[in-house]
Image: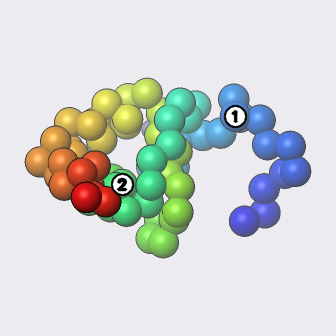
Amino acid sequence: MAEPRHALKANKTCDVKGCASEAERSISGGAAKEAELKVDEGMKRVHLCKEHYREYKKLSKKERELETLGR
Ligand SMILES: [Zn+2]
């Protein structure tokens, strides 16, 4: 929403609640929800730090359908 015009990628922080690490990746809000990450509802993009991205990948292994959508 109220993002600075020239948001620097390096300044993004992880969107998981209680985490203040630097974000390295972003995933879709739906994917974050599927992986049951603690993020705000209704987010289109969710930024994750390295650690949470790893966690997301682990958790989302069962939810592979998301990646194969669009067939
Ligand atoms: Zn994090």
* Left or right of residue 54: residue 44: right
Q: Alpha-carbon neighbours of circle 1 within 10 Å: few (<14), some, or many (≥20)?
A: few
Q: Residue furthest left?
A: 62
Q: Nearer the viewer, residue 43 or 37?
A: 43
- What's the residue type where badge 2 is placed? Ala
Q: Residue furthest right?
A: 5
**Residue under pointer 1:** 9
Q: Is residue 54 visible?
A: yes
- The secondary element bearing badge 1 is classed as helix
- Quarter of the image holding residue 58? top left
User: In the displayed structure, would residue 24 be above or below residue 28?
Assistant: above
Q: Is residue 18 visible?
A: no
**Residue under pointer 2:** 32
Q: Nearer the viewer, residue 41 or 57?
A: 57
Locate residue 43, reporting x and y percent.
51, 65
Q: Residue at x 12, y 48 (%)?
A: 62
Q: Nearer the viewer, residue 71 or 12?
A: 71
